[in-house]
Image (spheres, rainbow, N blue to C red):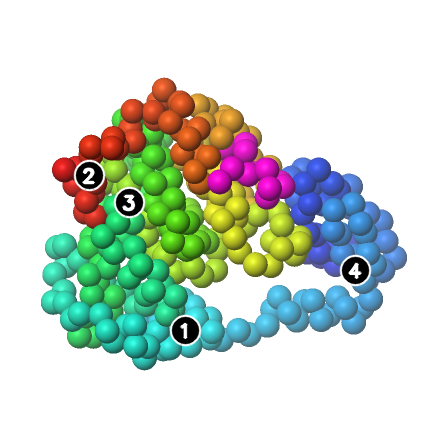
Amino acid sequence: MDYKGTYYEVRRVPGTLSDRLMNEDDFGILPKTTSPGVLIIGDKVEPMTLEQVENRKKYFKRDIGWGQDADGRWTDGEGLKDVQLALASDVFKSLPLVHFDEIIHHAKLPRSIQEIRNLVSVQGYPYLVQLIGRSDNDRLITLKFGKDLTSLLMNFLPEGGKASFPEEWKYQWIVDIVLGLQTLHMRNIFHRDLTSNNVLYDEEHAILCDLESGPHTSHTIPPELVQEVCTEFNETMDIYAFGTLLWTIENRNMPRAHRNLKCTGVFAGLMSKCLSVEPQERPTIDEVIAELKELPQTASLFPGLDTLITADMTVV
């Protein structure tokens, strides 16, 4: 950002000056400088030359070739290239041709070869979107399931307030979400974009969708990625995103990126662990499930050993 003629670039490190700048909106604590710009990482303040400032501004304003794909979704040039590679791939061509029925099916362009592989890998597993084939106009065909969770959580009524739903639904959604995430992690798949936009609900049950393993939403990005301490995505980052999803469900709001989140409600303890600044302090998905099995609100919602949940979320 530019403030009084000085360019400031802030990379948040919790508990430091950068954290206060991101959370307090107090321009008075910006460090004074005679340099054209300042890079702030944690408590470290580095002056920037005019050339560095201009290069950073060019980087953020660069033309990355945004355009619309055949589904009408906006993507960059690399994204469009990934779609083309996916359509030409052997794994896509090997999918069975399916006649599209808008009542029971959902159709979309594959976003990447990895997305197709992920969908194939979880075929037959509950709590996850189910791929059944491809259409003759080059779309992935999945089974339709309810609506996206955001549409309910953020559903404002004309008379004010938000649409209500049974509290028990919330508990079952969380159980279904962690069981879906457990299946992904068991198969070495990271979701990378675990938000309410990518959770589909049908009354009390939920499944995960958009297994693109692609770019993640800003408010789910963990501190270690922002700080560039770690550049390779791993399961602890999905757990951080699950913490932000818990916060979204509990507060019925979208968290602002890089802001401190106040953990409240029956899941406050688990939420706080998932949102830990230190990746090694976050629980694994198995530890998340173990903790949920100890909470009275969710303990009885896990399927028993003699219960079979089919891929279409039918209890047998």
Q: Kindly state the secondary structure of the residue where label 3 is placed.
A: loop
* Foreground of the two, 170 or 299: 299
Q: Earlier in the sequence, mark 3 or mark 1?
A: 1
Task: Answer whether labels 2 and 4 touch (C-beta < 8 Å).
Answer: no
Q: Residue furthest right?
A: 34
Q: Mark 1 belongs to which amino acid? A: Asp
- Identify which residue, 24 or 316, lies in the foreground: 316
Circle 3/circle 1 CB separation < 8 Å:
no
In the displayed structure image, the side of residue 25 where residue 49 appears, left or right: right
Distance (Cα) linking label 3 and label 2: 12 Å
Left or right of 244 on screen, residue 85:
left
* Residue receiving disc 1: 82
Residue 179: percent from left, percent from top: 34, 41
Name the residue tied to disc 3: 127
Q: Which residue is mark 4?
A: 37
Q: Identify the secondary structure beneath mark 4.
A: strand
Classify mark 1: residues with Cα within 10 Å, few (<14), some (14-19) or many (20+): some
Question: Does 248 sit left or right of 227 as displayed?
Answer: left
Which residue is drawn at the image coordinates 16% and 41% (left, top)? 314
Q: Is residue 273 in the magenta section?
A: yes
- For numbered disc 1, what is the local secondary structure? helix
Few, some or many C-alpha atoms within 10 Å of disc 2 (few <14, some 14-19, many ≥20)? few
Q: Position of residue 219 (x, y in %)?
A: 52, 47
Cα separation, mark 2 vs mark 4, equals 60 Å
Q: Give the amino acid at mark 4.
A: Gly
| Residue designated by label 2 | 308
Query: What amino acid is labelled 3 in the image?
Result: Tyr
Residue ID at (74%, 40%)? 16
Mark 3 Cα-neighbour bin, 10 Å: few <14, some 14–19, many ≥20 = many
* Span colored in magenta: 271-284
Disc 3 or disc 2, which is closer to the eye?
Answer: 2
| Eye-nearest disc, 3 or 1 | 3
